[in-house]
Image: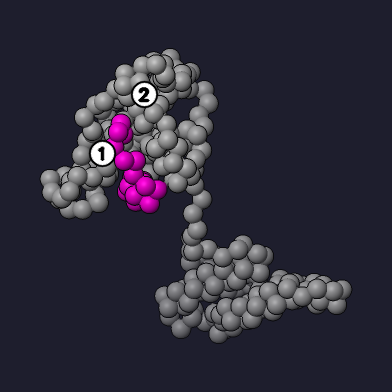
Amino acid sequence: MIVDRYAPVNLFALVPKLRLAFEPALRELDRLLDDDILFQRVKADLARRAPRSLIRGRHSTPVEVILRLLVVKRLYGWSYAETERFVADSLVLRQFCRVYLAAVPDDSTLIRWANLIEPSTLAALNDRVVELARRLRVTRGRKLRVDSMVVATTIHHPTDSALLGDAVRVLSRLLRRAKAMLADGAGLSPAVFRSRTRSVRRLAQQLHRLARRKGEAAAEELRAAYRQLPRFRPKGAGFDLMRRWAA
């Protein structure tokens, strides 16, 4: 079950001789993160973990703790594992993240929760923080540091031959669609609608093999193979037909 927050505990009052206090950045962030709009946006995303997570199940890590742990991670540029370790070892960060004397969630748990937060929520979170920061005169809002993460996606390396292959494949598909819409090909020869996808794919594979070889002979073969690429560029009646049909 989604839990909002732990019962408050003042860790600084438990050890007064240490004279613990927030540094200026944490002190201002502590005020900004008390905003209920930010809290409710994050809570709504975390509630998507299970259909009835708002009313059933064992108690989760509190929403307030997750939000503040992610802010600390971004503030100091730590990994999830470092965030877990440093927060667990610091009374100041425990107080800021409002985890108090409870166990700090491990890095895998924090990752699972973080993945539930939608990009739109992160954007709204950033906008809201900037708005509140300007209102409280923490910053003028002229510059904003953005922390982002690169993830793998299903695209290939954009080599010249690969880009040409993609272009030929798309143009061939458009020509097939144009042929299907024209009765008897509108009197055009079959060569106009010829697909060169296989030809350019074979040439691309040849270029990839040659690129892995070393030596002057291999370099000359690679140049010769590249000179064949213009043979597959869009031209002639087929290209003119494709442009008219696409328009």
Q: Is residue 78 above or below residue 213?
A: above
Residue 199 image position (x, y, % from top left): 63, 81
Few, some or many C-alpha atoms within 10 Å of disc 1 (few <14, some 14-19, many ≥20)?
some
Magenta span of residues: 99-118
Q: Nearer the viewer, residue 225 or 245?
A: 225
Residue 49 lies, with reference to residue 104, above or below; the image says below
Element on which disc 2 rests: helix
Residue 205 visible in this rendered orientation of the protein = yes
Residue where numbered disc 1 is placed = 62
**Above or below, 75 relative to 1:** above
Type of the residue with mark 1: Pro
The foreground one among 83 and 187 is 83
Q: How is the image coloured?
A: one colour
**Residue in the image at 50% along x and 58% along y:** 152
Residue 60 screen position, x and y as percent = 23, 45
- Describe the element under mark 1 as helix, strand or loop: loop
Going by the numbered disc 2, the residue's amino acid type is Asp
Q: Earlier in the sequence, mark 1 or mark 2?
A: 2
Q: Which mark is residue 30?
A: 2
Residue 115 in the image: state x and y as whole percent: 36, 49
Q: Is residue 106 left or right of residue 64?
A: right
Whole-number angstrom distance, CA of label 1 to CA of label 2: 16 Å
Query: Which of the 4 image quarters holds residue 232?
Result: bottom right
Crowdedness near tag 2: few (<14), some (14–19) or many (≥20) residues, C-alpha within 10 Å = some
Whether residue 96 is situated above or below residue 70 in the rendered picture: above
